[in-house]
Image (cartoon, rainbow, N blue to C red):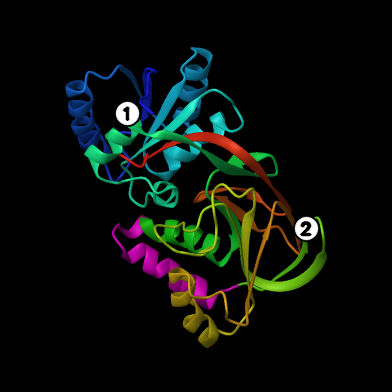
Amino acid sequence: MRNTHRICFIVNKTAGAGRCEALFKRAEAILNARKAEYVVHCTEYGGHAINLTEQAVKDGEKFIVAVGGDGTVNEVSSVLCGIEGIAFGILPFGTGNDVARNAGLPLEIDKAVNTLLNGSLHNYDMGRANGRPFINAGGFGFDVDVIINTEKHKKGGGGMLPYLLGIVDTLFNRKKIRAIIETKHERFEKEIMVAVVANGAQFGGGMRVAPDAKTDDGLFDVCLIEHVGLLSLLFLLPLFTKGKHLSKKPVLYFKTDYVRFETDSKYPIQLDGEIVETTPVEYSIVKNALSMVKPSASV
């Protein structure tokens, strides 16, 4: 199916550690050579992609493309969630590009542009957490504490060191979370360290936390890890990141279109990598939330 609508690009030039701007210029050269009709809007601050997408919808744009990383994809898709008649595309010019990988989108510039011009529409689910849309994954516990602790250490410098220090801090200050978990069919209580509610198979830059997840089945893949000792956790973490943890005893993994967590204290939750609020939290699936442009068989 060849795209016949003008493409509206929402571009985060700072994505991918600042590489997005140069990558998009290369994409524009291909678009111009193919005589594609398009318009470009660039973000100027965090959350600006939301405002730009809302305006694009008001202006009647029928094909809106997020250009950047997963944060930009989250902002654009959160506006388009549940709106019919608008095609959604991605130029994956960020660092992790987990959503693009989950969707089976090519990461090479020429193939990514060709997908926009000649791809086909596919249904793509999203989720809501306390009513707030997200496209890939949400949760609380160990992984969220790593995000928070990493930010603390970034004050002393960049690179991988803050992340490694964030992991060490979290390992030695891990929390035991008493949670009541409720689905449409059951209600139970667990002492957990991690709770991930996933739409896509991977998040956090390639961690395959929900290896069985499908983005068009109308279901979340929920992964819970019960509280374990330090040695057990050190053994489990590499398996957790590689998607080889499902058969291990501390792991509870199930599919559902609705789940609610009530916890003994308020714990920060992340949606698509951003800390947004705290527990308690209620997750619901939005089936066929997006019409995403993905490669056709001939692309």
Q: Give the residue pinned by disc 2.
A: 183
The quadrant in which the N terminus is found is: top left
Vertical side of 18 occupied by 52: above or below: above
**Labels 1, 2: front one:** 1
Q: Amino acid at mark 2?
A: Thr
Could you tell me which residue is drawn at 48 percent across and 32 percent down?
A: 76
Horizontal arrangement in the rendering, residue 56 relative to residue 29 (left or right)? right
Question: Going 43% across and 60% down the picture, which residue do you hit?
Answer: 150
Q: Main secondary structure of the magenta part?
A: helix
Q: Position of residue 250 (x, y in %)?
A: 62, 79
Q: Earlier in the sequence, mark 1 or mark 2?
A: 1
Q: Residue at x 54, y 63 (%)?
A: 212
Q: Residue 279, image x and y in percent?
A: 70, 54
- Relative to 191, does residue 52 appear above or below in the rendering? above
Residue pictured at 18% horizontal, 33% vertical: 26
Quadrant of the snapshot with the C terminus: top left
